[in-house]
Image: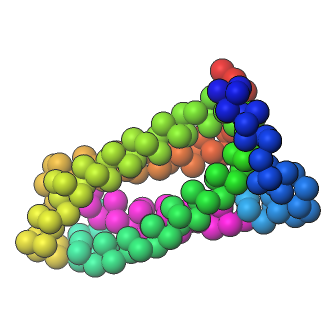
Amino acid sequence: MEQFGKLVESTALHEWMLTTEWLWPWLEIIHFFGLSLLLGALLVIDLRMAGFFRQINIKVTHSLLPWVFAGFGLNVVTGVLFFFGDPMRYAINIGFQFKMGLIVLAGLNALWYWWQIHDEMNSWAPDINPPLLAKTIAIVSLGCWTGVLLLGRLIPYVGTG
């Protein structure tokens, strides 16, 4: 990992991150905005899929998915830039490592949703109490993304574990 970090430190992108005044704070703002889009929309989608707020049409909540993807895209771009800005700090940080693990788990959970629930939802009544599998996927999603949020905030405060 140290060799990879040193390779990243030799790039123009690393130099740009370190030498551009106000870049890091602006990226933090964009990262926070992306996280707000991602988690705000997923909170509505996942809570409804978990069986809450049955007065809301479950299919309509999924119209928020473009906001989830937009927020995720902003966070991927800014997150990669943060990594390029300080690769040695992030690579060995236990909070960052667990955060990346939860993002992978959240992605696998999203695939599980896509394979098992997405098509089936078209036949659901608007006020359905979703099946156990849908509720499980929603709760796993909420847990993963809450963990990502918390671990992201811990990165400056935890070390190498």
Stretch in magenta: 29-51
The C terminus lies in quadrant? top right
Where residue 17 appears, as percent x and y from the top left, is: 81, 55
The N terminus lies in quadrant? top right
Left/right of residue 152 with respect to residue 120 in the rendered view: right
Q: Is residue 100 magenta?
A: no
Where residue 50 appears, as percent x and y from the top left, is: 27, 56
Answer above or below: position of 7 versus 14: above
Left/right of residue 86 with respect to residue 21 in the rendered view: left
Most frequent secondary structure within the magenta stretch: helix
Q: Is residue 36 magenta?
A: yes
Answer above or below: position of 60 versus 96: below
Q: Is residue 57 visible?
A: yes
Where residue 119 appears, as percent x and y from the top left, is: 14, 66
Answer above or below: position of 24 versus 124: above
Q: Which residue appears at 31% of the width and 72% of the height?
A: 62
Left/right of residue 38 with respect to residue 109 in the rendered view: right
Q: Which residue appears at 17% of the width and 49% of the height?
A: 133
Q: Which is nearer the eye, 20 or 141?
A: 20
Q: Total marks drawn?
A: 0
The single residue placed furthest to the left in the displayed view is 123
Q: Which is nearer the eye, 43 or 109?
A: 109
Where residue 146 appears, as percent x and y from the top left, is: 49, 48
